Image (spheres, rainbow, N blue to C red):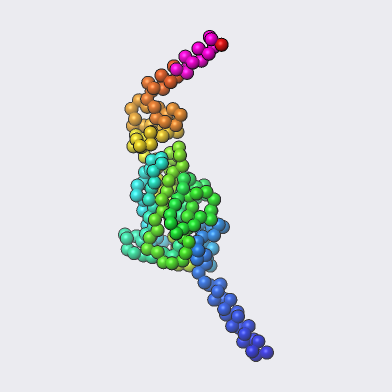
């Protein structure tokens, strides 16, 4: 009986220890995608200043171009972290992602292509991701990250904003636009079929369409 009780005690102690092994060593679970809160116990995020920064290669973007996102210790102090979950969102507190995030050694268990988390529990001094906007997207995007130093120390929804650089500054992208305001800074140009086009060209196009219509109506 004593031996049995002793064995039971050892089993219970082992079980308790296993329960406190760091949760989700191979990345954030799908259940964390919306709230971005780890399933650790206790799951209470830090409220003070974060030990980490989210740095962007540019705070503005153009269509079809990549923006580099780097997670690292503040002031490049070498502060290590264990894990992260990052998303490119249309709003910080709205679970709607935009564009795509890519990186090596990461995983995505969330919907869409713009979510990434760590794939192992090794300590990291930095993580580098690449964000690419969807074609035709010209709204603001937010890089939103939860960064985990250790099981009970983490910061939720740290974020930085990315804004559209404007068609005038995105010449390599042929002046992609959704509305005339996107062509501001390009003198005399208006948004036609998703491209910034000069007012004169727009008039020519309309005239050609009308000529074709008239020809069809009078000859058929």
Residue found 38% across the figure and 50% down from its top: 68
Q: Outermost residue toward the right?
A: 1
Compared to residue 109, the image places residue 10 above or below, namely below
Q: Residue at x 51, y 15 (%)?
A: 213
Q: Please say whether residue 206 is visible from this viewpoint.
A: yes
Q: Is residue 157 visible?
A: no
Q: Quadrant of the C terminus?
A: top right
Determine whether, in the image, residue 20 is placed left or right of residue 166.
right
Q: Nearer the viewer, residue 110 or 60?
A: 110
Considering depth in this image, is 155 or 220 the residue closer to the camera? 220
Residue lying at the far bottom of the rendered structure: 2
Residue lying farthest to the front in this orientation: 220
Q: How far across and how far down the image is residue 61, in percent? A: 38, 43
x then y, percent, for residue 204: 41, 19
Question: Which quadrant holds residue 200?
Answer: top left
Is 3 a magenta residue? no
Q: Which residues are magenta?
A: 208-219
Q: Quadrant of residue 192?
A: top left
Of residues 52 and 211, the one drawn nearer to the viewer in this rendering: 211
Residue 86, position as x, y percentages in the image: 46, 54
* Quarter of the rendering containing residue 205: top left
Q: Quadrant of the N terminus?
A: bottom right
Is 212 magenta? The answer is yes
Q: Residue at x 53, y 56 (%)?
A: 109
| Prevailing SS of the magenta stretch | helix
The residue sitting at 62% across, 87% down in the picture is 6
Give x and y (percent) for residue 188: 35, 25
């Amino acid at each position: 009986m004593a031996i049995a009780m002793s064995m039971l005690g050892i089993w219970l102690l082992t079980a308790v220890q296993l329960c406190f092994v760091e949760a989700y060593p191979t990345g954030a679970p799908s259940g964390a995608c919306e709230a971005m809160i780890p399933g650790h116990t206790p799951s209470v995020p830090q409220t003070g200043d974060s030990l980490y920064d989210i740095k962007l290669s540019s705070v503005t973007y153009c269509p079809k171009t990549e923006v580099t996102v780097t997670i690292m210790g503040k002031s490049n102090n070498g502060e290590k972290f264990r894990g992260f979950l990052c998303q490119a969102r249309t709003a910080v507190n709205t679970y709607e992602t935009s564009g795509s995030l890519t990186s090596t050694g990461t995983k995505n268990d969330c919907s869409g292509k713009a979510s990434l988390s760590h794939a192992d529990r090794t300590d990291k001094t930095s993580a580098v991701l690449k964000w690419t906007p969807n074609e035709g997207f010209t709204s603001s995007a937010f890089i939103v990250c939860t960064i985990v130093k250790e099981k009970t120390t983490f910061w939720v929804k740290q974020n930085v904003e990315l804004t559209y650089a404007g068609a005038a500054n995105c010449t390599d992208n042929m002046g992609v636009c959704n509305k005339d305001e996107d062509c501001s800074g390009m003198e005399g140009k208006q948004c036609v079929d998703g491209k910034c086009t000069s007012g004169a060209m727009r008039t020519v196009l309309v005239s050609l369409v009308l000529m074709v219509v008239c020809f069809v109506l009078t000859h058929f």
